[in-house]
Amino acid sequence: MKKPKRLTHLVVKKTDLDTIGGEALRILTSILRGVQWRRILENKNPEPCYIVINTDEPYIDEIVEVLKKHGHWDGWEDEAA
């Protein structure tokens, strides 16, 4: 699977979270609330919304081209600098 050179976000599917339950979910919820409060204190949106696209989608190269065009792409992990 292709991986970007620089990972800037952590993505976990909600359906995957629903399966862990219990103490682990309570801990994660507490961490996420802490992040929200920090963002509030920094006058940032406490619940930003992102578009997530898996790198194995057949159209990923088109998405990468758009990201490059707007200066938001650093390359793939296995690409030469």
Image (tube, rainbow, N blue to C red):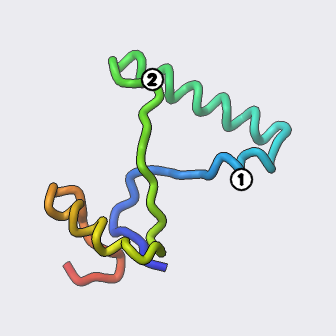
Residue 39 horizontal side relative to residue 65, left or right: right
Q: Quadrant of residue 18?
A: top right
Label 2 amino acid? Arg
Label 1: which residue? 16
Within the image, what quadrant is residue 34 found in?
top right
Q: Judge from the rendering whether residue 8 lies leftward or rightward of residue 13; answer left or right.
A: left
- Alpha-carbon span between mark 2 and mark 1: 25 Å
Label 1 is placed on what type of residue? Asp
At 35% from the left and 23% from the top, the residue drawn is 44
Q: Residue at x 23, y 83 (%)?
A: 80
Quadrant where the C terminus lies?
bottom left
Dot 2 alpha-carbon crowd within 10 angstroms: few under 14, some 14 to 19, many 20 or more: few
Q: Where does label 2 land, which residue? A: 38
- The image position of residue 73, as x and y in percent, is 24, 62
Q: Residue at x 42, y 18 (%)?
A: 40
Secondary structure at numbered mark 1: helix
- Across and down, in percent, residue 4 comes to 36, 68
Residue depicted at 49% across the width and 79% down the height? 1
